[in-house]
Image: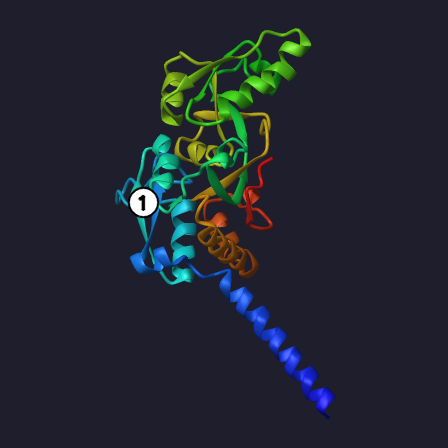
Amino acid sequence: MKTFALTATAVLSALISVSSWAADTHVLPKSITEKGYISAGIAPNYPPMDFKDPATNKLTGIDYDLGTEISKRLGIEIRWQETAFEQMVSGLATNRIDIVMSGMTDTPERQKTVDFVDYFSTGPQFYTLESQKDLKDIDDMCGKKIGTSRRTTFPVEIAKWSDVNCVAKGKPAIVVIGTEGSADARAQLRQGRLDAAVQGSETLPYIQGQEPGVFKVIGGTLARQLTGLGVAKNNPELSAAIIATLNDMIKDGSYAKILDKWQLKDGAVAEATLNGAK
């Protein structure tokens, strides 16, 4: 009888221990709970990830929806802080913001200063105007002037693709033109200053839907990339709480529901992870 009692006690103790560990993964840092909110950096110029509804001028998009649901489940307010993309990493380092949730690509280089909770999969993709009848498939990009935001990793990805698929095959290299952003690339495309452009594959269905018959996508993605929610490296407790919450959302289907709302369920990840880019 004593043997059974000891075994039961041990099992109960183990269950409590496991339960406590599971609960701890959702616990926010004391600095956040004392402050009473999470400050989230966002640059609302990248639909459908982050933008302002033209009708209301209010923030919306995948990141806004995911961030709002994460904060709700963690039982804390989220305060969105519009921040220039190039200032986001420094904002984390100086504690002006707690997280970056603005379609930022996880890269090994960025991981040197920021931790990434990876929650979405995408990749750079060529597109051009429907009126560009001579550009029909991806091989037609060789030797062309291709524009893309210089703030992203896309200029490097285009150059890599060009080396392998153009230069190595005796074709002229792509001329990569850095632009101020995606909107600037589209403007230059319309003006005839570019032959084509590159954006994240997650943005192109939205752009095509906004202006039917204007743009066409050329080929598939040039590379697979992970989109990550940025957290300061000295704040692992916050990263753990967000990962646990996102994985709860993946399991119960609310994550898929948000992506499906924006017609981007193909970008879903099976599990939220830390620093997945290699």
Q: Residue at x 40, y 51 (%)?
A: 67
Q: In the image shown, does 47 or 251 lie closer to the viewer?
A: 251
Rendered view: 30 above or below 198: below
Which quarter of the figure has residue 137? top right
Residue 213's spot in the image, x, y percent? 45, 27
Task: Answer whether residue 242 is visible to the viewer in this image.
Answer: yes
Residue drawn 53% across the image and 27% down it: 125
Q: Please name the residue shown 70% across and 82% down the image.
A: 7
Residue 137 is at least partly visible in this image? no
Q: Residue at x 57, y 43 (%)?
A: 266
Residue 276, given in percent of the width and then of the height, sits at: 58, 41
Give the quarter of the figure containing the C terminus: top right
Q: Which residue is nearer to you in this view: 110 or 271?
A: 110
Q: Nearer the viewer, residue 245 or 126?
A: 245
Q: Residue furthest left?
A: 56
Way the structure is coloured: rainbow
In this rendered view, identify the residue nearer to me: 18 or 141.
Answer: 18
Q: Is the residue marked by circle 1 packed among few (<14), some (14-19), or many (20+) residues within 10 Å?
A: some
Describe residue 63's horizontal placement relative to residue 53 as left or right.
right
Residue farthest toward the bottom in the current orientation of the protein: 1
Mark 1 secondary-structure assignment: strand
Q: Name the image quarter holding residue 247.
A: bottom right
Query: Could you tell me residue 99's position as x and y percent?
Result: 39, 45
Q: Which residue is mark 1?
A: 59
The quadrant of the rendering that contains the N terminus is: bottom right
Q: Amino acid at mark 1?
A: Leu
Q: Position of residue 80 (x, y in %)?
A: 31, 47
Q: Is residue 68 left or right of residue 144?
A: left
> How many labels, in total?
1
